[in-house]
Amino acid sequence: MPDGAFVCPSCNFELGLTQRIPVTRADWCPHCGALVPSGARECPKCGMPLPSAAQPPRHLAVRDLKLPKIEDEPKVEAAPDPDATTVTVPRIESAIPSEPNPSSPSAARDRIPHAKVFLVAALVAVAVIGGASLVITHPWDPAAYMGAPTQDADLSKVGYPGSVESLSGQDKDAAQDSGVAGDDSQDSTLTSLQADYESLKVLADRIDENWSTFQAKATTGTLGERRAGRAEAQSIALDVSNLIEDVSSLDDGAGIYAEDKEHLVTLGNWLRNRVDALTKGWEASASATDLSADARTIRSYVPSGTNDYKTLFDQNYEAWAPGGE
C-alpha cells in the first residue's frame, strides 16, 4: 500500500489511520481531550458544549507543542547518544475529519466507474444473451423443434364410417313417412321432448290453481294458509326451472329438434314469469303483519285480471307440440 493511504487500494478496507497535521497552538476539549477547531462552540467528537472563543475559560488548556517536521526524504540520523533521554511523541487524534486527497491511489478506486466500463459490460451482456438465443432457436435449422409430420398422408377417408345398406332396430318405411331419421338417439330425444311438453301443461294447471288460491287467501286467509300458498309457489318455481334445464340439455338430433326445444323453453319461461310473480306476492302476504293495510301492495304482485304470460302460453301450447308439422 502507498504511504499516506487511509484505505486499502485493493479491498477499500479502512485502515484506521489519522492524518498528521502540524499544530503550534491548538485548543483541546476539556471533556474528552480531542483537538477542536479554534472558536468552535461544541466538540465535534463528543458533542459537549465548549466555552466561546471570545471568553476562553481559564481551565481550557492551551498547549504549545513542538512537533517534528516531516520532510519528503528521510534524513540519516546520527548514532543515538547513550546519555540522551528518548522521548516518544504521542499520536494526535483529531476530531476534525480530513479532506480526501485527490492524488491518492485509493481515491481513484472510490470513484464511479468510467463510461467505458459500462460500455464493455453492455457489450458482454448483449453477446451472452444473443448467443443463448441463437442456441435455443436454431435459426440455421428451422425444423429442429418441429413436431408436425413432414410427409403427406391420405386423409380422404378420415372419419368415414363405411357404407350402410339398411337401417336396423326400426321400420324403415315408418321412419321415411315421419320424416325423422331412424336413429335410436333421435327417437329418445323426441320422446323426452314430448314428455316435457306434457309436464308443461301440468305445471300450467298448478300455477292456475295457485293463482286462484292467491286471489282468495292472500289478503284474508290465516297465516297457515298463506304460508302453504307460498310453499306451493316455491315448489312450482323449482319444478319449472328444472324442466327448462332438462329441455335445454337435450340433444337436438343434429338440428332436427332445435326449433322444438326453443318452443318448449319459451313456454317454460312464460310459466316461470307467472310463478315468480306468485312467489313474490305470497312472500309479501306471509310476512305482512297488517293484511288490511298491506292488501294493496300484496295484490300488486298478482293482479286479478288477465295475465299476458298466461295468454301467450294458452295461444301457442297446442301449436308448438314436438314432432308436429
Image (cartoon, helix red, strand yellow):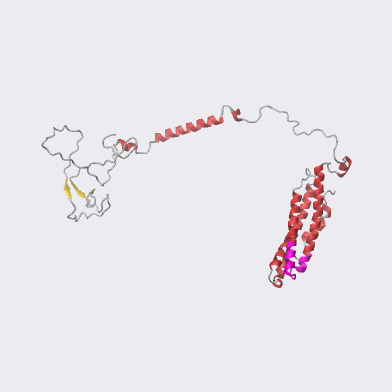
- Residue drawn at x 77%, y 64% is 211
- Residue drawn at x 81%, y 47% is 190
Q: Which quarter of the figure has residue 295?
A: bottom right
Q: Which quarter of the figure has residue 93?
A: top left
- Residue drawn at x 72%, y 69% is 223
Residue 265, x across and y down, in percent: 76, 52
- In the rendered image, the vertical position of residue 128 relative to residue 218, given as above or below: above
Magenta residues, as a range? 212-231
Residue 13, x across and y down, in percent: 33, 39
Q: Quadrant of the N terminus?
A: top left
Say which of 83 and 278 sits in front: 83
Is residue 229 highlighted in magenta? yes
Main SS class of the magenta portion in the image:
helix
Residue 291, x across and y down, in percent: 71, 71
Position of 27 compared to 267: left or right?
left
- In the rendered image, the vertical position of residue 86 relative to residue 155, given as above or below: below
